[in-house]
Image: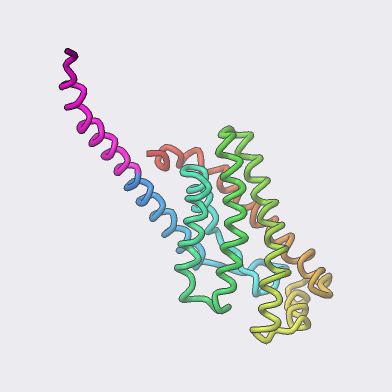
Amino acid sequence: MKDTSTSTSSEPTTNRGQNSRQSSVRIRWIAKTGILSAAAIALMYLEFSLPFFPGFLKFDFSEVPALLATFSMGPLTGITVELIKNLAHLPASHTAMVGELANFIICSSFVGVAGLIYRYNKTKKGAMISLAAGTAALTISGCLVNYFISIPFYINAMGFSMEAIKGAAHAAGNPFVKDIITLILYVFVPFNILKGLVISIIISLIYKKLSPLLHR
């Protein structure tokens, strides 16, 4: 008769080891996601205006931690950082939460697309392609969200007029804005391309140096 006592007794030990490893992975994921989310929140509050863009458009670097999360832990983690960041910004919202919703959709498309491509091509070339695709997604989603959500909200709910928005663009030094289409083409498109480019350059410079810490 075959003795099964050894294999039977080792089963609980194996399960305990697996559970311990899984628990350790979860704890590390929560800790890293929390740290990167805190960094994203702080950077989102440090927003500022750019020359030649209307004052209602603010630039910030909060996508840097989100992209670090996406490249090191996957696109869902990057989107989680985006969600936490925007939820934390709600107390300071001046747009009845619509601005945060728009930011979440637009920036999640950036980190999500970039992270999904990089997940299957983790090379320097893959990183460049993923950041370029993410910038394209950021720009396209920015056009759609602003055309269908943000601008109609500002006009219909917040009391802004197209004339006031056009005036803000002209005051910033952009004479090309005449209507909602030219507003998107000459303001939102260059703004999002610039943002994607700047964030991509920063990620290209720092990700390799931070990668050992992010993968612990």
In depth, the one of 149 and 72 nearer the eye is 149
Would residue 35 be found to the left or right of residue 197 on screen?
left
Is 17 within the magenta? yes
Q: What is the quadrant of residue 11 in the picture?
A: top left
Which residue is farthest top?
1
Q: Residue at x 55, y 79 (%)?
A: 96
Residue range corresponding to the magenta coloring: 1-25
Q: Relative to residue 193, is residue 165 depicted above or below? A: below
Point out residue 125 in the picture as x, y percentages from the top left corner: 64, 34
Residue at the far bottom in the pictured view: 159
**Quadrant the C terminus occupies:** top left
Q: How is the image coloured?
A: rainbow
Residue 4 drawn in magenta? yes
Report the magenta stretch's main SS: helix
Q: Residue 211, position in %: x, y?
A: 46, 39
Q: Which residue: 55% across, 56% down?
A: 63
Percent position of residue 171, x then y: 75, 77
Q: Nearer the viewer, residue 202 or 25?
A: 25
Quarter of the picture containing the N terminus is top left
Residue 94: quarter of image: bottom right
Q: Position of residue 95 (x, y in %)?
A: 58, 78
- Identify the residue shown where x is 76% and y is 66%: 184
Tally of numbered discs: 0
Is residue 166 left or right of 7 when viewed as pictured?
right
Q: Is residue 83 above or below residue 121?
A: below
